Amino acid sequence: MGERLAYELRHKFSQGKFLIPVYREDEADLILKGEITKIYVEPVAYEIFLQTRERKVHFEGRFQLIERKTGTIIYENPKFSRFETYRVSENVVGLLDPGRKEALLKLSQDLSELIFQEIWLK
């Protein structure tokens, strides 16, 4: 999830064309640091006992926008959360959960958009 979120954030920031993502910290003017503190899945709806029809993926994390040269925290959100609900296929057997991967992808895209908006629109 962390790698996917980092990819989505780089993509989102590069679309704005006013910041150019770099991969080395010493080349950056601003540093976006974050931490995923919790990801968990919970059942939402059941067909019968122990047969889930819908699940919810919860994300919790925090992030900071830091000026590299001075180390000044320009913006910080100490608790950032979001969730995505997804359907569970009737054909899912055992630990396989194909809807979960799609939900995590959608969640990463949503989080990158929300982080981008939170930083630049506040």
Image (cartoon, rainbow, N blue to C red):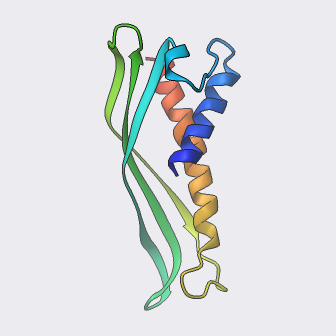
Q: Give 5 or 16, whichever is nearer the viewer.
A: 5
Residue 63: x, y in percent?
38, 32
Front position in the image: 68 or 14 = 68
In the image as oriented, which residue stretches furthest toward the left? Answer: 78
Residue 6 as seen in the image, left or right of residue 59: right
Res. 8 image quadrant: top right
44 vs 66, nearest the viewer:
66
Residue shown at 34%/8% (left/top)? 70
Q: In this view, does 121 lie above or below 34?
A: above
Indicate the position of residue 29 as horizontal and vertical percent values.
50, 11
Q: Which residue is drawn at 39% across and 18% down?
A: 66
Seen in the picture, residue 51 relative to 76 is either above or below; the reply is below
Q: From the viewer's side, name the closer residue of 24 and 105.
A: 24
User: In this rendering, is residue 39 above or below 76?
Assistant: below
- How many marks overall? 0
Image point (52%, 61%), residue name: 85
- Going by the image, does 100 lie left or right of 118? right
Residue 77 percent coordinates (x, y): 34, 30
Give how far across and how far down residue 44 sits, in percent: 44, 72
Q: Which quadrant of the figure contains the C terminus? A: top left
Which residue is at 55% across, 50% downward? 107
> Residue extending furthest bottom?
49
